[in-house]
Image (cartoon, coloured by chain):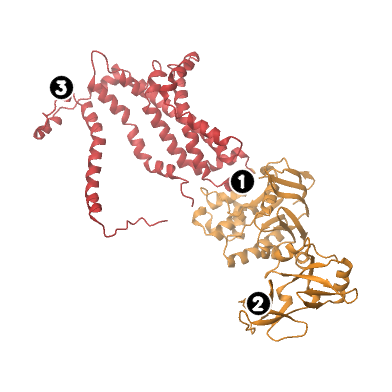
Chain colours: A red, B orange
Amino acid sequence: MASRELISYDTGATVKILKWVSPVFLGAYLIWALLPLFIMLMASFKDLLDAFTLPKPGQWGDVGVFFDFSPTITHYIALFAENNFGTYLFNSLVASVGSAMIAVTLGSMCAYSLSRTEFRGKKDLLFWIISTRMAPIVAVIVPLYAIFRSADLVGTLPGLILAFTTFNLPFAIWMLKGFFDGVPYAIEEAAQVDGNNRFQAFLMILPLVAPGIGAFVILCILFAWNDFLFATIIGSGGAKTLPAATKELVQPQNIDWGKIMAAGVVTTAPMIPLGLLVRRYLVAGLTMGAVKE
Amino acid sequence: MVAVSFNNVWKDYGDSVAVRDLNMNIKDGEFVSLLGPSGCGKSTSLRMLAGLEHITSGEIVFGDKVVNQLPPKDRDIAMVFENYALYPHKTIFDNIANPLKRAKISPSEITRRVNEAAKLLEIDHLLERRPQELSGGQKQRTAIGRAIVRQPQVYLFDEPIAHLDAKLRARMRSELKHMQFNLGVTTIYVTHDQLEALTMADRIAVMNDGVLQQFGTPQEIYENPVNSWVATFVGEPQMSLMEMSMTGEKGDAALDFFGNIISLDAASSSRLTKAGIADLLVGVRPDKASVSLQETPGAIKAEVYSRQLLGADVLVEVAIGKTRVRAKADTSFMGNVGEPCYLNFSSENLYYFNAEDGKVVER
């Protein structure tokens, strides 16, 4: 393993300035990334009047008013009591986890085959698989809607799962193929000689690509969870997910900011611990096989 | 335990032929070594035996059963891979136990047999560890343990000790040989190291360019190589080849080596005159050639090219024109590079090959 030590040499003025500039840049970036989340969280606990109480521009002394409010959870209660957010949360969960599971099952088998076999046109097939992700979804949503419509899948959870799977699967195949490529073929050969059939040998090496599969499942869930286009068009009606439901809080005569903020928190909250929990796992998975040991 | 045969086996990879018309009958319980340089088709042949490669044409027979269409799991074989191919996520115990688990043997029996194999291989204290915590030698013994834990019909070894250090390799050679003798299971052992083949195998199959060159006991291969390629491949230090031509009539035939006349003993003389080949490749093993700084009768004048100390003796390479000949000499030989010297060998110890096709001159 290469040394992790940072080697420093006598450096010129540019490097010294950069050393000073980079923390400033990082600090600014941090505020830019976290402030919207922070405002969202604060606003979700404020009633409408408090939410729009802001200091005058330039009056930094009055920044305190931003924090001067009595917290209320009425928006959250209303979301679940009046707007059925329990169902939408459930829909989001089922659709994202369901599509991730299907994509990972089909994807790992497909990726394994593509990793282990050689046949004419393999490169073209691989390219075709990923090319389905190159066109923006908007470009295909109309014909896709027509197909889903005639199959009676619009507005159903299976329909939404299918829709999410169609855009997660190509990604799964490409990502998982890389992981399988990193597993020495000799291990499966040993498994076959040990008395396993080909499928059992495939199952034997699955633990070796587990970090990759874990990372991929999480990415799939994130994609599906955050998706808006499919959710509003294919899922609208019977299979509304959180982002689609949140959008409906914007009514022509009344934009319910408190509820929208609360819905934002409800949508974001489950993904943050997931992201934090799997952060190391994700990095291990994505870089796995990048360097041969 | 079963006899294994290759019947007219071919293996193509697209346009390139890896194994060409292989015919070989391996007896039940025999230890056969497939020997050859890398890319000679020896590993491919082994992998076809294992069922890991398809056979392009021909038959592989275990006992009286053609196994061409059997997947590896149904061939009842155990294989040790060059890079060990252990399951990295399993403990050593589970690695060794894996073939038994597939065979649906009771857990208590599995434990007993794994412990027995581990004890034999002296890895019984490592059973709870994982492969990455083990040294190369220990990994290799785990891989062997996985093979010997059950009694398969055939053992297949694919250069199992190639990556070990020299000392451990020497020890493992004798351990493997001992173990195979005790277990009595038909064993096919692929190696590029002729020392491994000579020391361990009952019979050696020498391969080159996908073609089986010779199949025989180590002694046969060493003493009666069928062609100049086998002769130079087997034996360390390597046999030297010299281009010579026949001269003289029947009765007083001799060899002409760049103007040096080498007289022949009666057996060689009659053998060579009977064959009637004008241009020969004549081989001599270094320990049958001698070199001296003093001129002796019948010696060939040469020049010292290099001098390598082997320990008990020195290997001297001498140059006669463009031909180089290796000879063993006493450590007291002090010739320096470029110094004139005299090479001597007796015609009884020479190997004769046809210069045209390299085939041995018939006896």
Amino acid on which disc 1 is placed: Glu
Whether labels 1 and 2 share one chain = no
Residue A230 appears in the rendering: yes
Which chain does tag 3 point to?
A
Rounded to the nearest angstrom, the CA distance separating label 1 from label 3 is 69 Å
Which chain does tag 2 point to?
B
Which chain does tag 1 point to?
A
Residue A49 disc label:
3
Residue B316 lies left or right of residue B300; in this view the side is left
All told, the count of numbered labels is 3
Residue position marked by numbered label 2 in the rendering: B316
Residue position marked by numbered label 1 in the rendering: A189
Percent position of residue B119, x then y: 60, 59
Up-down relation of residue A47 to residue B43 (above or below)? above
Up-down relation of residue A184 to residue B242 (above or below)? above
Whether labels 1 and 3 share one chain = yes
Amino acid on which disc 3 is placed: Leu
Upstream in sequence: badge 1 or badge 3: 3
Residue B67 appears in the rendering: no
